[in-house]
Image: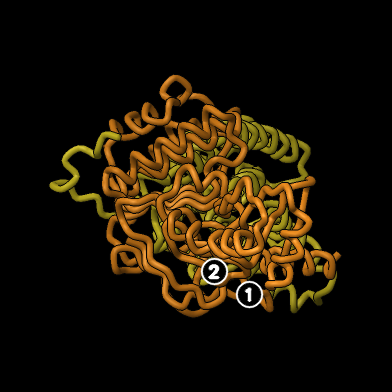
Chain colours: A orange, B yellow
Amino acid sequence: MIEIQDLTKRYGRTVAVDGLSFTVRPGHVTGFLGPNGAGKSTTMRTIVGLDHPTTGTATVAGRRYRDHAAPLREVGALLEARAFQKARSARNHLLALAQTHGIPEVRVDAVLAMVGLEEVGHRRAGGYSLGMAQRLGVAAALLGDPAVVVLDEPVNGLDPDGVLWVRTLLKTLATQGRTVLVSSHLMSEMAVTADRLVIIGRGRLLAEASIGELTARAGVGRVLVRSPQATDLRELLVGRGATVTSAEPGVLQVDGLGAGTIADLAVGRGLAVHELTPQHASLEQAYMELTRDAVQYQDQQRVMSS
Amino acid sequence: MTALAGHDRVDYRVTMGRVVRSEWTKLRSVRSTWVMLAAAALLTVGLAAAFGYGYGQQIHSGEVHPSTAEAASAAFLGLDLFALVVGVFGVMRMTGEYGSGLIGASLLAVPRRLPVLWAKALALAAVIAPVALAVSVASFLISQVFAGSHGAGLGDPGVPRAILGAAAYPVAMGLLGLGIGAILRHTAAAITVFAAALLVIPALLPAALSQQAQDAVMKYLPVVAGQAMFDLGEAGPVRLLAPGAAAVVLAGYVIVLLAGGAALLQRRDA
């Protein structure tokens, strides 16, 4: 379990994380979402003590990461694509990390096999492709058989096979009862991997919900209406305060009125309706809706600083 | 995913001994460590042979009177080169981790951080010390062979101490490099500062100081203190500390720089 409480991180005058609080529970894959620059990486680095919080706390299993006697047994983290020296073999890289905890060499070979690098483990890690480097990072994260796994954008730059591999791995880890926190700036990726979502923007919490709750919450109630008397129907609905747009003749997109109300109004006027479909907002739309302000702010900052 | 076998019964705590082992693995598992040490050692011993030959020639031509001090001075002149290489190596122990991103993985494994620096210092000293001792002994012996009949012997007064001093000097330089690397984190910056502080400043400083000031100040510079540890007197133009005092001064630099590096390592975001 990861608990973030009132976490704030400032770099000079820039506020990367701003009073953030959330909890990540075991047994689920928790997606950590936000636009680029939202503060995801900073938050993750704070969880494992690489960055010091300005105020607030981040704890793992009730303690600061650095206060655990065997930290790699608590948290396995993949934070950078290449956190190794090029001249060293993957196996020796993992061995050096394992030795800090007295983790035996057989475990090093086991995690190499787990990520599919057993054949190339003796080679210089500098010659690895991005995909292989990412696998080595995952191997390092799994070294201590940790209760909590934290992965920052693990599918970035991976080929489709690699993406599928990471998804399966995350689900397996969660099924084993581990706490899994994985960041991404793509809702489409999280939609297929995560059970729960923590969404942040500009360092602040925007939503903490299950995938289902989020779509429900963002069900903005647009209704698609098909009618041979679309022009009359449109006038009627606008008169009742709806916003109506039309992409093609005879088809209306109605915002602001429910499907039931629209049907009742049409019947009252004797207007024919051939189709009446409530449109559920996709997860992607819900995410865009939530983060719009944060993204605009980022863009403004970029324009102002360029 | 298979579990870490029997982890409930085994103690996986991070201990100083374990971190030292880890750092030793990092050190030995990169081929450049051995290439660099071997190349620097051979070059230094080769220089000692050349300096020994030159010393023999100077005696023949009557420019220099034969003495143990002169013979030792010729033998250990090349140690500055070895110390420079080892110092850069020490810098790289730390800056290499920042440059590659390995530091993140290292500090995830040892989030208390300071053991990483202490273990690096121990592993570094452990790899340099035996090589430095071998270089020091070999430099002395080969230099005396090339000096001919006027060479000094291993049993001559002060010679064993000078050999030990010449072996300790590169170890201290390596640790100074490590400290500077921990403070500055960037390879180019740290190597520049190391070379400037240890080699350039001692060469330029005399031009800015009166003879009196030179005598008062120069002997406290790290390189000059290092040289004092293997000096047998009456050889150089610069007034030197006694070997014991020089060792204390050099150790002081090492402690101050490593402590500075430790404080920053602890405080900064990685």
Secondary structure under the numbered disc 2 in the rendered image: strand
Residue B27 visible (yes or no): yes
Q: Residues within 10 Å of mark 1 (few under 14, many from 20)?
A: some
- The earlier-in-sequence mark between 1 and 2 is 1
Residue drawn at x 84%, y 73% is: B208
In the picture provided, is B122 more to the left or to the right than B253?
left
Indicate the position of residue A179 as horizontal and vertical percent values: 34, 53
Q: Quadrant of residue A267?
A: bottom right
Vertical position of residue A39 compared to residue B152: above or below: below
Quarter of the figure with residue A114: top left
Residue sitting nearer the eye, A209 or A221: A221
B55 relative position to A197: left or right: right
Foreground label between 1 and 2: 2
Residue at the image position 84 percent from the left and 70 percent from the top? A304
Q: Residue at x 59, y 41 (%)?
A: A156
| Residue A74 badge | none
**Extreme top residue here?**
A119
| In contact (CB < 8 Å): disc 1 and disc 2 | no
Q: Position of residue A213 (x, y in %)?
A: 44, 60
Quarter of the image with the N terminus of chain A is bottom left
- Name the residue: 30% across, 51% down: A27
Residue B112 in the image: x percent, y percent?
39, 63
Instruction: Tell me the SS state at disc 1.
Output: strand
- Is residue B66 something that shows in the picture? no
Type of amino acid under label 1:
Val
Question: Which residue corresponds to mark 1?
Answer: A15
Horizontal relation, residue A101 to residue A40: left or right: left
Q: In the rendered view, would you say A179 is above or below B148?
A: below
- Tell me the chain of label 2: A
Which residue position is annotated with label 2? Answer: A206
Mark 1 chain: A
* The furthest residue to the front: A270
